[in-house]
Amino acid sequence: MGWHGQLKLIDDNMASEHGGSLSVGRQKGRRPFSRKKAMHLVLRSDVAKGPLSLLQKAHACFIRTCLSKLSRRYEVRVYQFANAGSHLHLVIRAKSRESFQAFLRAFAGTVALKVTRASKNNRFGRFWLYLCYSRLVEWGVAFKTVKAYVWQNELEGLGLIPYQTRKIRPPPV
């Protein structure tokens, strides 16, 4: 499925998106959630370069281990995961809003602390560029499209395929 299929998917689900660059200059609202639908999450960092890259071997191993432990602890099913160096993609489904929020808070915080080596005595500042982007995903074609997109990001992050520029969708009205 090409990008145009996904573009339509995104346009149809504008009300089910939250965070990322969509949240800049907007009032903070409640994140859409459904225990019956999968979610596509993106955590992006503009400082994750060089020694802070999420693809550094130690960081990548830690992120996978952390994701596994926290997903079990908070009853979050991970369908697909991609580490692209400067951002992480996840396709997940959580049992409840509370477990999803706890998982997201713990995962984002733990990864940021590990990568930056921040502590009380060693402050770093903001690691993640925006709030975590999330979007509800319908089952079927939309779910398969998102999984393929995340897989493509994983291959690009590993350098197995060249990065392909994508069309930027227009901002929501």
Image (spheres, rainbow, N blue to C red):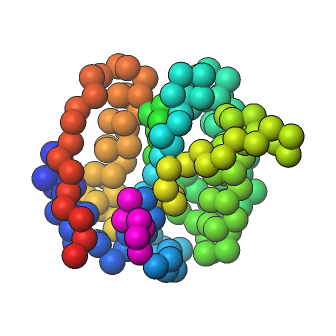
Q: Which residues are magenta?
A: 21-26
Q: Is residue 62 above or below residue 126?
A: above
Which quadrant would the C terminus be assigned to in this image? bottom left
Quadrant of the image occupied by residue 163 = top left
State the residue at coordinates (50%, 50%).
Answer: 129
Using the image as rendered, state which of residue 79 and residue 12 is in the foreground.
12
Q: Is residue 10 above or below residue 98?
A: above
Give coordinates of residue 6: x percent, y percent.
21, 55
Q: Does residue 97 appear in the picture of this structure?
A: yes
Magenta-drawn stretch contains 25: yes
State the residue at coordinates (36%, 36%).
Answer: 153
Q: Say left or right for 73 vs 57.
A: right
Using the image as rendered, state which of residue 83 and residue 80 is in the foreground.
83
Magenta-drawn stretch contains 52: no
Q: How many marks?
A: 0
Using the image as rendered, state which of residue 122 and residue 103 is in the foreground.
122
